[in-house]
Amino acid sequence: MKSDPLANNDKRQALVLLTGITANSAKKSHLLSYFQQNSRFSVFLPGLCQYFGVKFAANQLVRFLDHHKLADFSKCHFICYISGGLILRSALASQPLANTGRIVYIRSPFQELLPGLAIQKYGRLPTLIRYGKMLLDLTSQLKMEPAIAAAETGVVIERGLSASALQMGLKKSDFERYRHRSDFVMPPALETLTTPLSHDEVYTNDELLETLNRFIQSGHFKVNPNVG
């Protein structure tokens, strides 16, 4: 008999979902719905405007955390997709959150090359107008700054190629080369998980979302972390 994932609810802990720039309304809706149904914690998904860049979105996040009194929860955990991680880092640098709990970063060596490739292809000004300042921030020194220091941090690395990455001519066989680029800066992590999924899939693949949920709730990606 399958156990009820909400049998041991703890609504005094919070989970904040910070999506990236490719998350459309359908992906956000699926992500929020999944965690509302399966997380033991109170779940939040801020509606941040990323078009104007990291600092603008970070200021919005600070106001969101204040408005929902997330500092009053016993713990506040985060799941961050690429630019969401930069936004969280900027927000907590300006207003630290003493009850910060576990953090999961979803990263992609392929997807994180695309902003720079777009600037090369279209030019800096057309890219700024079309995609906004966030795309420029994703190629700047902002992404080289240290990540948030959390007691329990997990990192998921995508091996798959999104449709956009394929269009830009990237190849799966180059994963290791891109993974070890000097500008693909990884936060110190308690655990690292590599998934075959692409960035197109990581918002809506329930198997992966279950794995993220497990880390947030237990500090481990695996069901039996000491096995295998």
Image (spheres, helix red, strand yellow):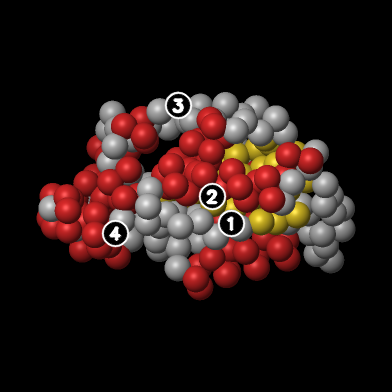
Amino acid type, residue under disc 2 in the picture: Gln
Q: Position of residue 87 (x, y in %)?
A: 48, 43
Q: Are marks 1 and 2 in contact (CB under 8 Å)?
A: yes
Give the spatial CA distance, label 4 vs label 2. 19 Å
Please report the residue visible at 53 percent of the width from the left and 30 percent of the height from the top.
93
Residue at image mark 2: 60
Task: Name which of mark 1 and mark 2 comes first in the sequence.
Answer: 1
195 lies left or right of 45:
left
Amino acid at the residue labelled 3: Pro
Judge from the rendering whether residue 156 lies leftward or rightward of residue 168; answer left or right: right
Q: Residues within 10 Å of mark 1 (few under 14, many from 20)?
A: some
Q: Along the horizontal axis of the image, is 30 left or right of 15? A: left
> How far across and down, in percent of the image, does residue 16 sit?
63, 50
For discs 3 and 1, the disc positioned in front in the rendered view: 1
Residue at numbered disc 1: 46
Do the residues bearing badges 1 and 4 touch, measured as CB atoms within 8 Å? no
Question: How much space separates mark 4 and mark 3, taking CA atoms?
Answer: 25 Å
Q: CA distance from mark 1 to mark 4?
A: 20 Å
- Under mark 4, the amino acid is Tyr
Query: Which residue occupies 28% across, 41% down?
Result: 139
Kind of element beneath mark 2: helix
